[in-house]
Amino acid sequence: MLSLELPVLDTSQGDRLSRDAYRADFRERVWGDEGHDSWKLERQQHFQEPGSDSWKAFSQGDWEGALRLIEQRRDGLLQYMGEAAKRNFSLYRVRVVEEPIAPYLQWELHLLRLRAECGERIRVVGPEHIRGLEESGPLPELVSLGGRTLYKVVYDSRGISDGAVRFVDPDVLTRWEEFIEGLYEAGEEMSSYFERKVAPLPPPTAAE
């Protein structure tokens, strides 16, 4: 377990946004102030992403089709990361991965490998890194933007996006960015984790 102090995140101090409002707010704030990095923490092992053609193919058992559709996103991701570079900020992500790797997560890790190849800075941590930090429940799904905004992303019981809680308190934002950075520093680079643990796996048999 890492020697990290878990920050407090009181959702009553944030603004609850519906899914559509969250998407609109995110688009408005995504570039933020130049020079401020973005940090993301993903904890859950299963989501549903009906807005993704690749996920749909995966969920219908078309693994090869799902991988082809992931690869088709390369040009768009390269363009996005190029814009981020022009604005002098980087995107960091920490992905918690439990083993054996769930079918959904096997699909997502292929997408994250592509994101890493396009310039996103992604590392993997295991449950051993966060042991003792989840006594009150799983770590939240978080994303920070532009040094101004922190979102706690909300999902329904099916794992489908249901909006977010937005925080704009600089102290809350700073504490959580520092916490995610601590996890990131202890994590394994996506490229090496993928080659060790994901590449050897057979296609998943079901979209659980």
Image (cartoon, helix red, strand yellow):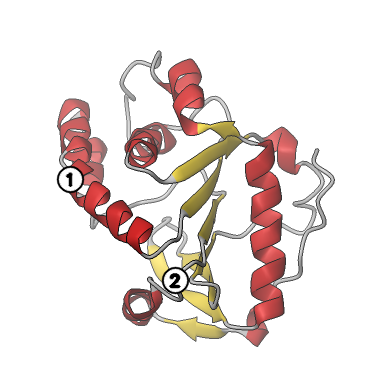
Which quadrant would residue 58 be assigned to in this image? top left
The answer to whether 30 appears left or right of 12 in the picture is left
The x, y position of residue 14, in whole percent, is: 60, 84
Quadrant of res 50: bottom left
Mark before the other along the chain sequence, 1 or 2: 2
Q: Tell me which amino acid carries mark 1.
A: Asp
- Is 184 above or below relative to 149? above
Note whether residue 200 is visible. Answer: yes
Q: CA separation, marks 1 and 2?
A: 23 Å
Mark 1 sits on what residue? Answer: 75
Up the image or down, 109 lies above or below 77; here it is: above
For residue 193, above or below residue 113: above
**Which residue is at 44% across, 82% downward?**
17
At 32% from the left edge and 30% from the top edge, which residue is drawn?
A: 206
Residue 60 visible: no
CA neighbours of label 1 inside 10 A, class few (<14), some (14 to 19), many (20+): few
Q: Is residue 114 left or right of residue 67?
A: right
- Name the element at disc 1: helix
Q: Residue 6, image x and y in percent?
A: 78, 59
- Label ID, residue 113: none
Amino acid under label 2?
A: Glu
| Dot in front, 1 or 2 | 2
User: What residue sits 29% from the left and 60% below the top?
Assistant: 83
- In the rendered image of this protein, does residue 174 appear above or below residue 17? above
Location of the N terminus by quadrant is: top right
Q: Nearer the viewer, residue 198 or 102?
A: 198
Q: Is residue 18 left or right of residue 71?
A: right
Q: Which residue is mark 2?
A: 34
Residue 149 falls left or right of residue 47:
right
Locate residue 38, reporting x and y percent: 50, 61
Classify the position of the C terminus by image quarter.
Answer: top left
Q: Which residue: 22% across, 31% down?
A: 67
